[in-house]
Amino acid sequence: MIIRKFCPTDLKRVFEIENMSFDQSYGIKMFQQLYEMGIGFLVAEEDSYVIGYVMFWIKYESCGHIISIAVDKDYRRLGAGTKLLIKAISVLSLINLDTIYLEVNENNDGAIEFYKTFNFKVDRTVPNYYTNGDGAIVMYLPLRNGKVSSD
């Protein structure tokens, strides 16, 4: 398995993964616009087949943000999500950030536990964050001098 930069030919496949992973997804045009904006966009590839992706950016001067991460349902629990998140954290850690944060559906216990294994902490809940009425849990990963902090 390799982690590499997203390229435009990956767009259709990434969108398929997004749709199989989330009840509501970003539209394909949104993925294209985010890529054109220059956000961090990586894919996991197994035997030249895209099996997952992560998108991230610097939202504020001192905060990184994981926009979306997903793995094809047939390739889950094989380490792709872990490798993608490690690489995204590594890239964001090269910048002098205080925090990396993300939002996760409050009903997605598996994802919440996954993020906790990386020392993400719960910050707050945002009611009705998603269009279906589900709330989001905002989680954050404290950084100190570009490295993951235990704070």
Image: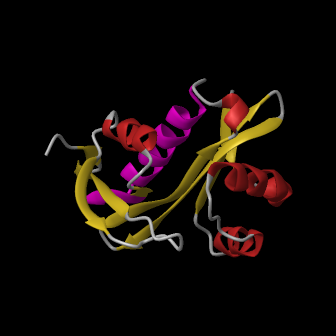
The residue drawn where x is 33% and y is 65% is 63
Residue 113 image point, x, y percent = 36, 37
Q: Is residue 94 left or right of residue 21?
A: left
Residue 8 image point, x, y percent = 81, 60
Q: Is residue 52 left or right of residue 123?
A: right
Q: Is residue 56 visible?
A: yes
Q: Residue furthest front?
A: 133
Which sits in the foreground, 50 or 133?
A: 133
Q: How is the image coloured?
A: secondary structure
Residue 140 image point, x, y percent = 29, 55
Q: Is residue 94 visible?
A: no
Which sits in the foreground, 132 or 94?
A: 132
Q: Is residue 88 left or right of residue 49?
A: left
The N terminus, quarter of image: top right
Q: Is residue 151 left or right of residue 132?
A: left
The residue drawn where x is 82% and y is 27% is 47
The residue drawn where x is 42% and y is 72% is 129
| Quadrant of residue 76 within the rendered picture | top right
- Count of residue discs: 0
Whether the magenta-drawn stretch holds residue 22 is answered as no
Q: Residue furthest top?
A: 78
The residue drawn where x is 69% and y is 30% is 75
Above or below — where is 41 with respect to 46? below
Which sits in the foreground, 133 or 129?
A: 133
Above or below — where is 43 with respect to 58? above
Q: Which residues are magenta?
A: 79-103
